[in-house]
Image (cartoon, grey):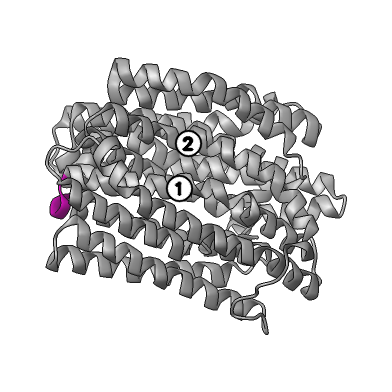
Amino acid sequence: MRRNVIANAIGGGLSAALNLLLIPIALRQLGLEAYGVIAFLASTQVFLSLFDIGLSPAITWAMASTGDIETQRRSIRGVWSPYVLIGVLLGTAVVLTAPFLAASWLQLTELSRQEATTALSLGGIAVALRWPVSLLSGILAGLQRFDYLNLAKGLHAVASFLGAVTVLSVFPGIVPFALWLAISALVEVSAYRVAVQRAIPRLPLWPFGPAGTAPRVWRYARGVAVIAALSLLLTQADRVVIAKTALASDLGRYSVAYALVFGLSLIPLFVTTAYYPRLVADHSEGEMRRFADRYRDASQVLIYLYSLPFSVLTVLGSWVLNLIAAPASSTTTVVVLALLSVGFWLNTSAALAYVAALATANTRLPIIINAFNVLWYLPVLVVAALSFGIIGVAAGWVLLNASYLLTLIPAVHRRILGEPVVPWLIKTLIPFPLLACATLLAARLVLTESEQNPIVSLLGFVVASAAYLVIGWCFLGRRLQTSTPLAGRLVSRP
């Protein structure tokens, strides 16, 4: 388990770091409005994952719930053909609707409609090319081959970053950059396909087969598809609404803040993708006590790791923006960044509860909760956007994720784990963010009053962060503290 989390951290961390480094370069070379269009394209691609229809998490579940290689091959063959076809149709749809999106949806003031149309069309090609990546990732995760998964992810991240920097330097403009995105998508899907071929020897390069060969995968996928549809409405609606109600430059500012916070979502991804196959196996074997222990451990690890970068963006948001994305830095962007950080922290707090529901095939619970949230959140989002702009939209994101503390988490604890939620809140949820914010706020107050130079200030915040990691480690359960040889010797030492 530890190796899986570390592999995810290396592969995902490298990808996140390179994406973060690309933000100031893209902003400088493309401009705020063109960056907003690229962000809209990225959001559209995420929204289109609705048409995954639950097959990616379903194939992970299918791979993890059986060790029979022939059953695994049959499951892959049963979903591959329709999955690839869906990607081709979606890419075609984006290309065909690109003129409408450029002319009637995006509020452009500097970028020409022709440039935006071409960029969106190239984005449609990228959608079709990289569509199988999600399914291939699900296969590798279900097999618990996180070494292959993260090797493919890391190699693509490096190639994509170097290519993007080269294109932005030699051919600065939204159209060449969008063309590179399409080429990068081809490189990505090729890397993942080779990784799957390594993990499952003798699997055909394109394992087409009839959908009827994997009935259990399709049954599981139905429930997950509904959850995914509702989740996408909730998570992607903010930028779609902003694109329609605000200038593209405001969308650019919001997208910069969102990109900074969204990079932190890789931390829950490191943990949940490593634990999910094990939770599936525990449930399949009837080991619910072990299931509950894994849930508690994963929750503590996740919130311990996430609370520090969350507090950095909340407490030091203006400093981070000036360092990484100065062209988009403003008081409004700082407020948006802080609100989005709080919302993402709340979302992360519910991540393991969501994973526990999926691991036990209890899809009804998140479906009911997300359906209720759609009913109230979307109207609130539109009103907030029209009344308060991008700050209102970010505040709506906080309200949405706060609702999971009152709904999803208590329901999972009661119905699946069979234990109260209050001890979990006291031991896991509350201490870490309070400790992280307190240490960074104390450092900020001391350093501000002392009027130290930037280098001293940076060292002060590094010391404060280290203090959080040390003190927070003491709040972890003993099983987690002794999970590595070095930590075990330190804890057990008289």
At x 71%, y 42%, the residue is: 223
Are the residues flagged by discs 2 and 1 in contact, CB closer than 8 Å? yes
Where is residue 32, by image quadrant? Answer: top left
Q: Give the camera-side residue of 196 and 337.
A: 196
At x 66%, y 29%, the residue is: 408
How would you rate the neighbour count of disc 2 (Cα within 10 Å): few for under 14, some for 14-19, many for 20 or more? some
Q: Residue 191, how many percent across, how many down?
A: 47, 74
How would you rate the neighbour count of disc 1 (Cα within 10 Å): few for under 14, some for 14-19, many for 20 or more? some
- The Cα–Cα distance between marks 2 and 1, rounded to whole angstroms, is 9 Å
424 drawn magenta: no
SS majority, magenta: helix
At x 55%, y 44%, the residue is: 302
Instruction: Report which residue position mark 1 lands on.
Output: 46
Residue 494 versus residue 66 in the image, above or below: above
Instruction: Report which residue position mark 2 lands on.
Output: 235
Which region is colored magenta? Answer: 27-31
